[in-house]
Amino acid sequence: MRIAMREAVAGRTFVQVVHCCAASDADRGRLVLESMRPHASLPERRTPPVGFRLTTAGVVDALERASRASRLLVVGCADATWFTQLRGSDVVARLARHADSPVMVVPHDEREPGRPGRVVLGGGRAAVGAATVRFALEQARDRATVVVVGREAADGATAPVLAELAGEFPDVAIDVHDRPGPRVVAGDLVVLERPEDRSVPFAWSLDPLVATTVTTAVERRCAIGIVPGDGR
């Protein structure tokens, strides 16, 4: 909830909280939404408008529809099976593969450090598209932090995209490291481009360097942003 509201403030938009339940559980669903209302505020800054919607539609269908008109879909996750298994956390795994908007997977017990977390761009030998690089730069700007990029991406196929877009974000520094994966710490946000192969678990379809970065982020309970590639 906190992350969703901060994203809404940065994007000058609103938050729509969606809770899905069976028709027979509607009363319980309303109680769930009511329990979230006390968290719909940001003490350190202005609070965006927040709406609450209860639906009896299937959770995947409801959230996929919501993603078509969303700037960002924020999904809480209790475990890491969306990354390591194809059908572990079914909802998160499907949304991460098929949502029209970027998806931010946030562990329920995400650790928030005293310092601003960095944004780590998951990139390897293959080029990372402009949409993903822009998302990482926007996140770093909004968080007043840096973008960490692996040297293989910074010096390789992603270099022209970084060079072109970095000029639009003059206040965002780009730190290049040989192996950023082991450097991921609690509070960081890892951003990666959605793999084209959606028939296998994420852990199998990523460049090895990217997979190492994401695995570390999962282990350290970091948020992970998954961005549809250019034209996908």
Image (cartoon, rainbow, N blue to C red):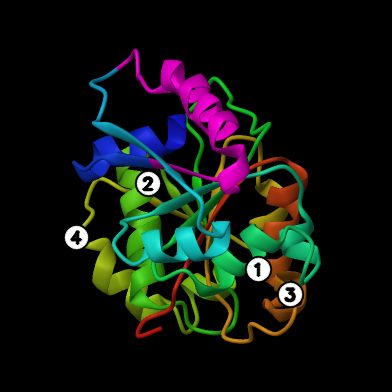
Q: Secondary structure at mark 2?
A: helix
Q: Is residue 138 above or below residue 1?
A: below
Which residue is disc 4 drawn over? 168
Q: Residue furthest front?
A: 24
| Residue in the image at 47% along x and 84% along y | 157
How far apart marks 1 and 3 lie (CA) works out to: 5 Å
Q: Secondary structure at mark 4?
A: loop
Label 3 vs 2, first from the N-terminus? 2
Q: Amino acid at mark 2?
A: Ala
Query: In the figure, is residue 145 to the left or right of 84?
Result: left
- In the image shown, does 101 or 127 lie closer to the viewer? 101
Crowding near the residue tagged with mark 2, few <14, some 14–19, many ≥20 C-alpha atoms within 10 Å? many
Q: Are marks 3 and 2 in contact (CB under 8 Å)?
A: no
Name the spot of residue 170 as percent of width and height, x first.
22, 52
Q: Give the extent of the magenta segment.
A: 17-44
Name the spot of residue 183 as percent of width and height, x first.
67, 47
How far apart marks 2 and 1 lie (CA) works out to: 19 Å
Mark number, residue 208: 3
Mark number, residue 210: 1
Label 3 vs 4, first from the N-terminus? 4
Mark number, residue 140: 2
Name the spot of residue 132 as percent of width and height, x first.
41, 68
